[in-house]
């Protein structure tokens, strides 16, 4: 598993599909963010529980907040100082889980 910072080629190839799927760059940081919206709090919290277990398996933990049916996720690899393959893999996994939980 790679944990080096993403190169410009990596960003074009691996990060761009995430940006096309609702993730966005955070101003002033080498970080991506996405807001996931679910039908209610219970489903949002269930998604967070499952996504959190996936993050734990990867030993890569998101910065996130939850307000009722919305979960805002920010990803970066703090100990590397920016975006790495871990962020891309966790973002993809979160997107897949969100689809399974019926995110809007």
Image (cartoon, rainbow, N blue to C red):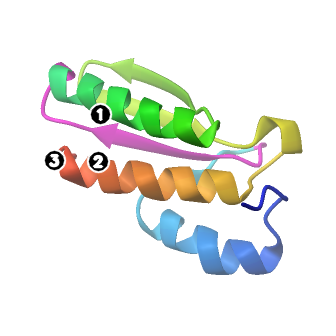
Q: Is residue 50 left or right of residue 20?
A: left
- Look at mark 1 in the image and give the residue it sits on: 47
Separation of marks 3 and 1 at Cα, in angstroms:
10 Å
Label disc, if present, on residue 22 of the rendered structure: none
* Percent coordinates x, y for residue 7 in the rendering: 83, 71
SS for callout 2: helix
Quadrant where the N terminus is found in the figure: bottom right
Q: Is residue 72 above or below residue 45?
A: below
Q: Residues within 10 Å of mark 3 (few under 14, many from 20)?
A: few
Towards the viewer: 48 or 19: 48
Disc 2 to disc 1: CB gap under 8 Å:
yes
The quarter holding residue 46 reads top left
Part of the protein shown in magenta: 28-41
Q: Is residue 70 left or right of residue 100?
A: right
- Look at mark 2 in the image and give the residue it sits on: 98
Q: Residues within 10 Å of mark 1 (few under 14, many from 20)?
A: many
Circle nearer the viewer, 3 or 1: 1
Name the residue: 83% across, 59% down. Answer: 5
- Look at mark 3 in the image and give the residue it sits on: 102
Name the residue: 31% across, 49% down. Answer: 97
């Amino acid at each position: 598993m790679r944990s080096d910072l993403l190169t410009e080629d990596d960003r074009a190839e691996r990060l761009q599909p995430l940006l096309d799927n609702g993730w966005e760059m955070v101003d002033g940081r080498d970080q991506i963010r996405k807001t996931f919206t679910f039908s209610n709090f219970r489903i949002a919290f269930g998604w967070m529980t499952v996504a959190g277990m996936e993050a734990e398996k990867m030993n890569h933990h998101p910065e996130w907040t939850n307000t009722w049916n919305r979960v805002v996720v920010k990803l970066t690899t703090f100990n590397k100082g920016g975006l790495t393959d871990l962020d891309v893999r966790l973002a993809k996994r979160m997107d897949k889980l969100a689809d399974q939980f019926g995110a809007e």
